[in-house]
Amino acid sequence: MESKRRVLVLEDDEGVRWSLESILTHFGFEVNVAANSSQFIAAINSDSHFDLMITDFNLDEAAFDGLSAVEAIRKKEPLLPIVMITAESLSHPRISQLSGTHSVATLEKPFSLTSLLQVLAQLGVSTE
């Protein structure tokens, strides 16, 4: 039996979190969702291995954002493909610093299923 690919979703917006979980489950991923930094830290400190992470750039926490999440998970899984989703312009200085970062792609909200699948393909993440 083939094991499911595991994805960690960090998103504070319940509707976006639910949509991502539904879409990714449909494509055969086992989805672990985190609504805040505490849940995220607990997930990455567990014995779990992830094949993909999707994180929001802006979280409702002053001291923790998507870049903090990338830094934290890179300590455990340095080559993990990551999708950074944001309502900010992709030219925002803190987001543009991700350009050229290994295995990180950005996706501007609102996004379509097609654009999500294109970003996953760009990162080499299969949805089949």
Image (spheres, helix red, strand yellow):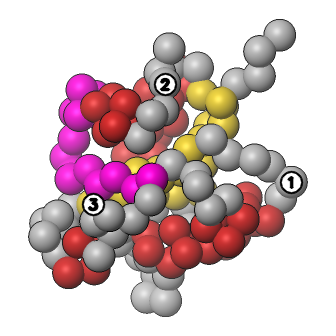
Mark positioned earlier in the residue sequence (2 or 3): 3
* Amino acid type, residue under disc 3 in the picture: Thr
User: Mark 1 Cα within 10 Å, few/some/many (few <14, many 20+)?
Assistant: few
126 on left or right of 29: left
Q: Does residue 105 belong to the magenta stretch?
A: yes
The residue at the point 20 percent across, 81 percent down is: 93
Q: Does residue 14 belong to the magenta stretch?
A: no
Rendering coords of residue 60 (x, y %): 41, 75
Q: Which residue is mark 2?
A: 126
Spatial separation of the CA atoms under disc 2 and disc 3: 22 Å
Where is residue 78, by image quadrant? bottom right
On residue 47, which mark appears?
1
Where is residue 117, by image quadrant? top left
38 on left or right of 127: right
* Amino acid type, residue under disc 2 in the picture: Ser
Q: Is residue 35 above or below residue 58?
A: above
Judging depth in this view, the residue of 75 and 63 nearest the camera is 75
On residue 86, which mark appears?
3
Q: Secondary structure at mark 1?
A: loop
Judging depth in this view, the residue of 105 and 39 nearest the camera is 105
Spatial separation of the CA atoms under disc 1 and disc 3: 28 Å
Q: Which residues are magenta?
A: 103-116
Spatial separation of the CA atoms under disc 2 and disc 1: 23 Å
Q: Is residue 4 above or below residue 83?
A: above
Mark positioned earlier in the residue sequence (1 or 3): 1
Rendering coords of residue 42 (x, y %): 75, 65
